[in-house]
C-alpha cells in the first residue's frame, strides 16, 4: 500500500468515525428517536410474558452459596426526619399503609407483618449495573396482604411509596423513591415484603424495616424503606409519570431484562 | 493493458446477504458501543453465580498512584496502567473514572438507562436480522453452497497451504476467487454459528425473568456472572473478527469488496478463453 493511500484511508476512517459518534450523541438527545428505542421495552415485556409461566420461580440457592459481601445500593441511610424518628424508636409506631383501589384499607405494624403468611427464599439479587449478590430473605407474601385488603377490579398496578429522598435536587416532588409492579408480579409466589435478611432483622442499608423482593426483576424494582402501598389503575399521576424513581430518570419500567 | 488480465464481473452476494450484512453492521456496532456503556456501570468481571467484589478477574478503575490518579486495569494477577484508555480517561483536565473511554460508548456520556434502551432495541434488530439470514441461508442453500468447506478444501495439505498464503497476504485469483477460501469459510462459520448466537444466549442469561423461564441455560454457562464474562469475551472475539475482516477487505481490494457487498458484483481476472 502506498503512503498516500494509507494516509487517505486513515483520514477517511477518522472522518467516518467522528461523524458516527457525533451522530449517535445527537440521536441520543433527540426525544423522537429515544421514544422509538423505548418501543423495544414493550416488545421485550410482551415476549417475556408470553414465554414465561406467570408462576415460574426465580432460582433459589443453598445457604452455602450466599454472598458474604452482599452489596447495598441507592440510599444507604435515609436522612428524612420522619424516617429517623421511626428508626430512633426501632420502628415501634411503624405502620405499613395499604390503600388506593382496595375495599379494605389496612395499617399493619411490624408484628402484624411478621404474623402474616410468609415465605423464606435464598435468591440472587441482580443489579442493573451488572453485579449479583445472593442473600436469604424472609417476608410477608404480598399476595396474601392484597387479598386481605381486597383489590378493586380496576386496580392494575401496585405502587410502593418509600421513606427515602434519593434525589434532593428534585424540585417537583419526584425526589422520593417509589416503584411499581403489575399484578402478575404482585401475585407471584416469591414476591414478598421482607423484614429479615440472612436470618437477622433487615439492616438499614438494605431497607429496614421493610423492603420489596420481586425476584424476576432487577434490583432497582426492589423498593427499600417501604412505607405505603397503593393500588392504582394507572401510573400517570405518580412522580414524573413513569412508575418509579429510576424509570422517571430514563430507566426501563419493566426490569425483567 | 496487454499485461493486465481482463476482468469479468461475477455475481458474488445475493440481495439477502447484502441487506442482512449491512443491517448487522449497524446493529452489532451499536450493540458493542451500548454494551460498553452498560459494562461501564460496573467495570469488573467475575466467574460463578455471584460477584466476588474483592476479587474480580477483570477490573478497570481509577487508583491513586503516588498522589496521581491513574487508570488501572487488572486481569487475574496482572496489573496494567491504562490511563487515558481504561479506568481513567477523557481530555486532560476533564478526565473521569470510567471503564471504557467516551469514544467507545453510546451515548458518549455516562447514562446506563439510555445505554440499555439502545442495547435492547438493536438486540431485537440483530436477532430478527440473524433469524432471516439463517432461515434463508439454510433453506436457500447459501450456507451449504457458499460457506461449508468442500471436501478438497478440508484436506490438511490444502488448509496448511491456505494459512501460508494468507500470512503472505496472497489471495486467490481467477477461477479460485469465485468461491470463499477455506480459512474464510471457517472464520465466517465461527462468527455466524458460534459467536453471534453465543451473544444472544449469554445476553438472555442477564435477564432475571428469562432465567426463571429457562433455568438450564444459565447453568450451562456456569451462573449469571460467568454468563456476563462469556458475553464480554464473545464480544471481544467479534471485535477481533471485525478488525481482521476490515484489514483483509482493504488489502484484498477495497473497492471490489465494497462493490460486491453493495451491488453484488465482484471482479475477477478472466482466465484465457473460457471466461
Image (cartoon, coloured by chain):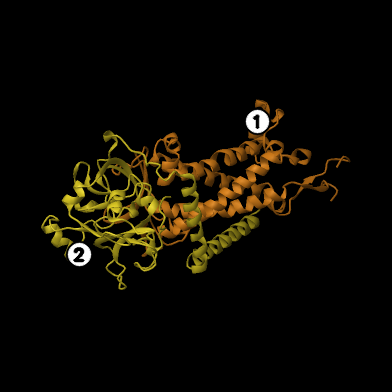
Residue at image location 46% in from the left, 49% down from the top: A49
- Chain letter of the residue carrying label 1: B
Q: Secondary structure at mark 1?
A: helix
Residue A167 drawn at (x, y percent): 29, 65
Q: What number of labels is visible?
A: 2
Residue at image location 43% in from the left, 56% down from the top: B101
- Note the chain letter of the orange one: B
The colour chain A appears in is yellow
Residue wearing tag 1: B159
Q: Is residue A151 above or below residue B143?
A: below
Residue B63 drawn at (x, y percent): 30, 52
The reply to whether residue A105 is in sight is yes
- Chain letter of the residue carrying label 2: A
Task: Residue B224: name its quadrant.
Answer: top left
Residue A115 drawn at (x, y percent): 19, 46
Q: Residue furthest bottom?
A: A171
Task: Residue B270: name its quadrant.
Answer: top right
**Discs 1 and 2 lie in a common subunit:** no
Amino acid at each position: 500500500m502506498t503512503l498516500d493511500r494509507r494516509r487517505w484511508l486513515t483520514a477517511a476512517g477518522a472522518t467516518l468515525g467522528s461523524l458516527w459518534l457525533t451522530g449517535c450523541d445527537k440521536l441520543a438527545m433527540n426525544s423522537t428517536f429515544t421514544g422509538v428505542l423505548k418501543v423495544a421495552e414493550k416488545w421485550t415485556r410482551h415476549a417475556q410474558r408470553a414465554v414465561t409461566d406467570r408462576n415460574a420461580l426465580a432460582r433459589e440457592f443453598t445457604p452455602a452459596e450466599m454472598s458474604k459481601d452482599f452489596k447495598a445500593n441507592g440510599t444507604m441511610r435515609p436522612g428524612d426526619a420522619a424516617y429517623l424518628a421511626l428508626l430512633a424508636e426501632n420502628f415501634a409506631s411503624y405502620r405499613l399503609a395499604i390503600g388506593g383501589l382496595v375495599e379494605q384499607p389496612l395499617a399493619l405494624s411490624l408484628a402484624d407483618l411478621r404474623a402474616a403468611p410468609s415465605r423464606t427464599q435464598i435468591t440472587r439479587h441482580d443489579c442493573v449495573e451488572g453485579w449479583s449478590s445472593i442473600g436469604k430473605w424472609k417476608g410477608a407474601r404480598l399476595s396474601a396482604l392484597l387479598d386481605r385488603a381486597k383489590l378493586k377490579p380496576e386496580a392494575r398496578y401496585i405502587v410502593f411509596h418509600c421513606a427515602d429522598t434519593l434525589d434532593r435536587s428534585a424540585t417537583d416532588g419526584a425526589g422520593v423513591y417509589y416503584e411499581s409492579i403489575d399484578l402478575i408480579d404482585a401475585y407471584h409466589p416469591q414476591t414478598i415484603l421482607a423484614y429479615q435478611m440472612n436470618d437477622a432483622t433487615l439492616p438499614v442499608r438494605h431497607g429496614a424495616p421493610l423492603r420489596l423482593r420481586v425476584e424476576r426483576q432487577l434490583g432497582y424494582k426492589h423498593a427499600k424503606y417501604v412505607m405505603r402501598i397503593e393500588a392504582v389503575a394507572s401510573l400517570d399521576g405518580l412522580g414524573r409519570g413513569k412508575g418509579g424513581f429510576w424509570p422517571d430518570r430514563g430507566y426501563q419500567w419493566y426490569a425483567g431484562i | 493493458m496487454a499485461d493486465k488480465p481482463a476482468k469479468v464481473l461475477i455475481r458474488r452476494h445475493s440481495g439477502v446477504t447484502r441487506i442482512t450484512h449491512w443491517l448487522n453492521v449497524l446493529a452489532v456496532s451499536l450493540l458493542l458501543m451500548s454494551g460498553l456503556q452498560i459494562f461501564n456501570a460496573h467495570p469488573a468481571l467475575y466467574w460463578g453465580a455471584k460477584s466476588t467484589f474483592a476479587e474480580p478477574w477483570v477490573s478497570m478503575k481509577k487508583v491513586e498512584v503516588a498522589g496521581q490518579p491513574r487508570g488501572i486495569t487488572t486481569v487475574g494477577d496482572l496489573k496494567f496502567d491504562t490511563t487515558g484508555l481504561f479506568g481513567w480517561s477523557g481530555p486532560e483536565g476533564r478526565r473521569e473514572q470510567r471503564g471504557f473511554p467516551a469514544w467507545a460508548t453510546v451515548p458518549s456520556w455516562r447514562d446506563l438507562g439510555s445505554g440499555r434502551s439502545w442495547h435492547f432495541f438493536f438486540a431485537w434488530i440483530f436477532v430478527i436480522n440473524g433469524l432471516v439470514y439463517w432461515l434463508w441461508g439454510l433453506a436457500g442453500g447459501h450456507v451449504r453452497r457458499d460457506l461449508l468447506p468442500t471436501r478438497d478444501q478440508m484436506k490438511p495439505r490444502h488448509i496448511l497451504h491456505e494459512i501460508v498464503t494468507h500470512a503472505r497476504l496472497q489471495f486467490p485469483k481467477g477461477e479460485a476467487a469465485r468461491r470463499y477460501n477455506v480459512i474464510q469459510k471457517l472464520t465466517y462459520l465461527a462468527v455466524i454459528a458460534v459467536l453471534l448466537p453465543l451473544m444472544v444466549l449469554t445476553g438472555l442469561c442477564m435477564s432475571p425473568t428469562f432465567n426463571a423461564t429457562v433455568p438450564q441455560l444459565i447453568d450451562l454457562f456456569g451462573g449469571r456472572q460467568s454468563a456476563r464474562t462469556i458475553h464480554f469475551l464473545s464480544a471481544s472475539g467479534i471485535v477481533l473478527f471485525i478488525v481482521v475482516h476490515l484489514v483483509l477487505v482493504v488489502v484484498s481490494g477495497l473497492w471490489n469488496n465494497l462493490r460486491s457487498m453493495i451491488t453484488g458484483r465482484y471482479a475477477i481476472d478472466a482466465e484465457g478463453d473460457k471466461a
